[in-house]
Image: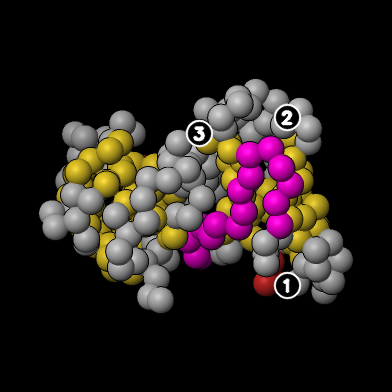
């Protein structure tokens, strides 16, 4: 079975620019997650979708970050405008359902560098 | 969510068992213990989870103490490809709160 796909794999932008990341979850997975992983730290959940509805966005910096999952499949995460501290790896994960923790499948991530 | 404590790093010889400890002294009755690992430049990978009983799958074994305040992940025959950061997570819902994990280095 195909895994979680993310693009681009790498992105370099200047501060105050905008950037968008794309995620295609595993087929049939209703739950989709976006995580931010700063160098040397564990991933931090930004937002969780169940189909196309938001379940948890309590840790999403909503003044600059936005995410959508319009048809309950693919998702995009946008940062506008980017700050230096947004430099991180952005990981997308999916699971069949918002079941108890196990069974989240992660993509390879998008590595963002903000100059 | 309960906080977990893991050693920052461990070494293991190839072919030997790797035993990774995790303390979660404030765990509550409905919280599960999960283990994920992250190989360099990849996304995290689910390994195993448990509530009270010991669990085993094709990747590893999870030993949870009777009082549930600590657990140990066992990789029975570590290989070089098991070199990774291992995260112990305690959760009652679907959110995963990652700490800094243990960097396991398997040496030839």
Rate crowding at label 2 as few (under 14), some (14 to 19) or many (20 or more) other CA atoms within 10 Å: some
Closer to the observer: label 1 or label 3?
3
Q: Are marks 2 and 3 on the same chain?
A: yes
**B6 or A102, nearer to the observer:** A102
Q: CA distance from mark 2 to mark 1?
A: 30 Å
> Furthest-front residue in view?
B53
> Which residue is pictured at 69% across the width and 38% down the height?
B52
- Residue at the disc numbered 2: B69
Q: Is residue A17 visible?
A: no
Name the quadrant containing residue B46. Answer: bottom right
Cβ–Cβ under 8 Å for marks 1 and 3: no
Percent from the top left, x then y, of residue B1? Answer: 52, 28
Q: Which mark is residue B92?
A: 3
Q: Earlier in the sequence, mark 2 or mark 3?
A: 2
Q: Secondary structure at mark 1?
A: helix
Q: CA distance from mark 1 to mark 3?
A: 33 Å
Q: CA distance from mark 2 to mark 3?
A: 15 Å
Q: Does the magenta segment cover residue B42? A: yes
Q: Earlier in the sequence, mark 2 or mark 1?
A: 2
Rate crowding at label 3 as few (under 14), some (14 to 19) or many (20 or more) other CA atoms within 10 Å: some
> Which residue is pictured at 18% across the width and 49% down the height?
A52
- Residue at the disc numbered 1: B80
Q: Chain of mark 3?
A: B
Name the quadrant containing residue A73. Answer: bottom left
Cβ–Cβ under 8 Å for marks 2 and 3: no
Percent from the top left, x then y, of residue A42? Answer: 52, 46
Q: Does the magenta segment cover residue A81? A: no
Q: In this picture, which residue range is highlighted in magenta?
A: B41-56
**A12 or A37, nearer to the observer:** A37
The colour mode here is secondary structure
């Amino acid at each position: 079975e195909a895994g979680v796909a993310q693009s681009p794999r790498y992105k370099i932008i200047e501060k105050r620019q905008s950037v968008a990341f794309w995620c295609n979850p595993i087929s049939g997975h209703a739950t989709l997650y976006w995580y931010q992983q700063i160098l040397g730290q564990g991933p931090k959940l930004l937002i969780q979708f169940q189909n196309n509805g938001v379940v948890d966005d309590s840790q999403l910096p909503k003044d600059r970050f936005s995410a959508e999952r319009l048809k309950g499949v693919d998702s995009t995460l946008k940062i506008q405008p980017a700050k230096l501290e947004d430099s991180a790896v952005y990981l997308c994960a999916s699971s069949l359902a918002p079941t108890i923790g196990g069974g989240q499948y992660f993509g390879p991530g998008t590595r963002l560098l903000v100059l | 969510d309960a906080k977990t404590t893991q050693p920052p790093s461990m070494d293991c010889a190839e072919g030997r068992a790797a035993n990774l400890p995790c303390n979660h002294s404030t765990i509550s009755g409905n919280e599960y213990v999960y283990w994920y690992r992250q190989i360099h430049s990849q996304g995290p990978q689910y390994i195993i989870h448990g509530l009270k009983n010991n669990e085993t799958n094709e990747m590893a074994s999870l030993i949870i103490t009777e009082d549930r305040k600590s657990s140990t992940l066992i990789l029975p025959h570590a290989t070089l490809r098991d070199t990774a950061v291992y995260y112990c997570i305690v959760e009652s819902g679907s959110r995963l709160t990652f700490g800094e994990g243990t960097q396991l280095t398997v040496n030839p």
